[in-house]
Every structure is written in structure tokens, then in C-alpha cells.
Image: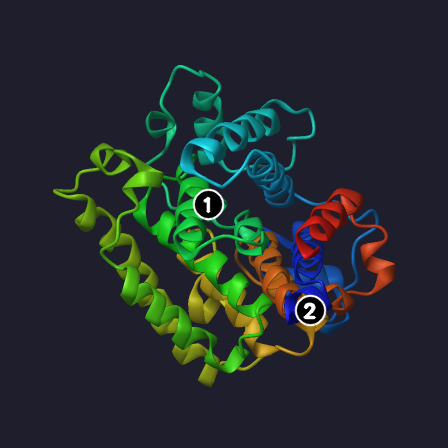
Amino acid sequence: MTTALAKRAATGSLLGLALGDALGFPTEFNDVPSILAKCGPWREMELPRPAIVTDDTQMTLALGRGLRTAMGRGTLTPARMQRPVREEFVDWYQSPDNNRAPGRTCLVACNLLRDESRPWQRASQTGSKGCGANMRVAPVGLVPGLSDEQRAGAAQLQAALTHGHPTALAASDLTAHAIRLLAQGAEPTGLVGLLRSYAYDNRSRYHERWLGDLWTHAQDPSPEHFIARGWDECLEALERLRAAVRTVSPETDPCLATGEGWIAEEALTTGLLCFLLFPDEPLAALRRAACTSGDSDSIACLTGAFAGARLGAGAWPRKWTDRIEYGGELQALGALWDA
């Protein structure tokens, strides 16, 4: 039995994502003094009642269902993945439960994806690198049996269905890679270095099999130039993270060091910073992420995904997981991938 199986990394990651989302939902759009005035000391923040999540968890589940369908039909390929994930995103867009202040890019792109005759590349918003690209990518890092090429391609494709900016693709790839590394037992102290090496190794690799002609919808002279722009911005963000891990006080708003998280590379690095400040204290990490001046729900959902991938399902108290919205479906997907 692998470490990931023994600790139920997929279940832990999905539950952590939703718990962070619910904890950060009431604090999004608030500055830290306002959050402290409303919630009290950040280390004592409690899960709201009811524990309602946002579009971050809803779209994570949509992606998870799409991947489950695709992989139930055989080896994961771009063609086999694109259709069911696209259909799940459109179903989310049309759902009456899509009332949690979703991002504009997701709404515009999913509306365009409704037209089945339109190639998905023409629906993708190539100017947007919002965090909606990678706040939902955790399932790609958790499903078993993927090659490195499949995982990278799938992470970038799911991002590109809505957010076609190269930084959105690279940040999503990095997020899925980080979750996979942690689920497999990577030590937090070496994580930033592993991610920087991965970014350098992939800097000029355009996954044409997965992305098709997406790059031609931007203003780049070549596919390599297009994707390198994204990796370079992620490398800059990882450099800020590397410095922050050494210097930032846990009592300071993490957004001041690595960004407010509205864009993909900042959501990745600020979510990672909150996790790395408390690698063995998952609730403290979630609470720190939710008490931030930026996109608190997305930062906290990524923090929870990282912490849960490393520590497993046992990281989270039953009194929280028993009442998180969509808890049954999150547990079922996790159990499938943990098996």
C-alpha cells in the first residue's frame, strides 16, 4: 500500500479544499482588520454554519465528474477528456446553484462553450489568467494512473477551457504537480525547489496534443513563445514565495508577500505560503488563508488541497467534514481515487 493510499490523500485534499472554501467565503473582499472584527482572532476562526462553499468547490466537482467519466471510457486523452469536462462546466453554468459570485471569465467562457459546434479554443478567454483556472485543478493531481504528460496536459486543458492565458495554464500545471508531489510524500521544505525545477524543465514545452491551436488566438509568434510567457510569470511568483517562506511572520497577512490571489500564479503561491507556514497544523493553515486581504476563499481552498494531500483525510475534524456542503460527493470521489 502506498503512502497516498494509506492516508487517503485524495479524500483529504478534496475535503480540505471545500473546508478552506467555506471558511474563506465570508471573508472574501474584506481586509484583515475587518475580518478580525467580524470573526475574532484568526487562530480561533470556526467553520460557518451552514458550511456553504463557492464556485471553487462546485467547479472542482465538475472537473472531477468529467475526469471520472472520461477515464471510465479508457485511457485519458484530450478528445476523451474535453467533451465530458466541457459538458460538466456548461451544466455548472446553467445550474440554479451557480449563485456564489462566480468569476466573469468562467461565466463568459462557459456561455460560449454551450455551442457544441464552437471549438473550445474559440471559447477560451486568452487574456484571462484569473485564479478560476487553478482553484479547481486538484482532481488532476489526485486521479491515479496518469503519466506526467497526461497530468500536465489535462491540467492545462481544463484551465484553457475557460482561462486561455499562458500563465493560467502554467499555474494550473504547477498546482496539480504540487498536489501530486505532496500526496506521494514530498517534504514541504523541498517543495518550492521541486516546483521551480519543474517550471524550468517545462518552460518551452507547448502541449499541442492537448491545446491544439490555442496559442494562435493570442499575439505570440510561436507556441513556445506563448507558453514561456506563462512559465516565466510563475517562476517570478515562485521566487517571491521562496523569499517569503524564509522571512514572513505567520501573524502577517500573507497577501502582502505573495499577492492577493485574484490571478492564477498568486493564488498558487499565496495558497502554498499559508500551507508552508503551518505544514503540520492544517487548521492553522486554513485559518491563516481565510484571514487574508485578497481572494480568501480561493487561497484557502488551495491551502486546504495542499494540506489534505500531504496529511490525508485524518487532517480534518469530523465535526467539520460532517457538515460541509457537497460532503458526500467529495468523499465519494476521494474514495474512488484513493482505492
Res. 277 in view: yes
Q: Secondary structure at mark 1?
A: helix
Q: Callout 2, which amino acid?
A: Met
Image coords of residue 111 (percent x, y): 48, 22
Residue highlighted by disc 1: 133
Query: In this picture, is 119 found above or below 332?
Result: above
Instruction: Classify mark 2: residues with Cα within 10 Å, few (<14), some (14-19) or many (20+).
Output: few
Q: Secondary structure at mark 2?
A: loop
Image coords of residue 13 (percent x, y): 65, 59
Image coords of residue 18 (percent x, y): 69, 52
Residue ID at (64%, 37%): 100
Q: Callout 1, which amino acid?
A: Ala
- In the rendered structure, the answer to whether residue 125 lies left or right of residue 294 reads left
Query: In this picture, is 200 found above or below 130?
Result: below
Identify the image quadrant of the N terminus: bottom right
Question: In this view of the protein, which residue sits in the foreground, 121 or 151?
Answer: 151
Q: What colouring method underlies this structural image?
A: rainbow
Query: In this picture, is 15 found above or below 40?
Result: above
Identify the image quadrant of the C terminus: bottom right
Q: How many marks?
A: 2
Residue ID at (43%, 63%): 259
Res. 260 in view: no
Picture quadrant where residue 210 is located: top left
Furthest residue in direction bottom, as rendered:
246
Which label's residue is closer to the chain start, 2 or 1? 2
Kindly report the distance in space between the C-alpha atoms of the residues bearing marks 2 and 1.
33 Å
Residue highlighted by disc 2: 1
Image coords of residue 123 (percent x, y): 38, 26
Res. 298 mark: none
- In the rendered structure, the answer to whether residue 30 lies left or right of residue 119 reads right
Residue ID at (58%, 71%): 275
